[in-house]
Image: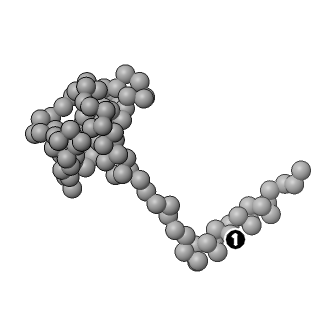
Amino acid sequence: MTKSITLPSGKIATVRPGRGYDLLQAQLKAKTSEEIPYALIAELTEIDGQKLVYEDILELDLSDVIALQAELSGKFQTTAPTVGNQNREKLQETVATINSLTPKA
């Protein structure tokens, strides 16, 4: 779902959902691994209706860049999977079996 946010500068940014292709494009366009988040912002964001390139992101006000980073990082936060009691018991049995088969030093 595409989301619009007002940046600290007053510009309107539209951030669309990403795909694996977007990440690949960002990785190809970035010169170093540290630059990938900026390239990904460029892949997924339009500002005031304009599509941007990676270098445009580097020229934005710092507060705008931080706001965009926060928006994107929120999309990728996940919660740890929960293990139900039945699965937990199976996991514990499997670990116990592996431990019993492992030679002791």
- Residue 9: image location, x then y, percent: 20, 38
In the image, 63 versus 98, the foreground residue is 63
Is 103 displayed left or right of 98 in the figure?
right
Could you tell me which residue is drawn at 30 percent across and 37 percent down? 63
Q: Alpha-carbon neighbours of circle 1 within 10 Å: few (<14), some, or many (≥20)?
A: few
Image-quadrant location for residue 99: bottom right
- Residue 100: image location, x then y, percent: 80, 63
Farthest residue, direction bottom:
86
Establish if 82 lies above or below 15.
below
Could you tell me which residue is drawn at 36 percent across and 51 percent down? 74
In the image, 63 versus 90, the foreground residue is 63
| Quarter of the picture holding the N terminus | bottom left
- Residue 42: image location, x then y, percent: 25, 34
Farthest residue, direction left:
49
Q: Is residue 77 visible?
A: yes
Farthest residue, direction top:
31
Establish if 7 lies above or below 79.
above
Labels in figure, total? 1
Q: Which amino acid, mark 1?
A: Glu
Image-quadrant location for residue 94: bottom right
Establish if 53 lies above or below 14.
above
Q: Is residue 26 visible?
A: no
Q: Tell me the colour scheme of the image.
A: one colour
Could you tell me which residue is drawn at 68 percent across and 69 percent down? 92
Farthest residue, direction right:
105
Could you tell me which residue is drawn at 12 percent across and 35 percent down? 50
What element does badge 1 sit on? helix
Q: Which residue is mark 1?
A: 93
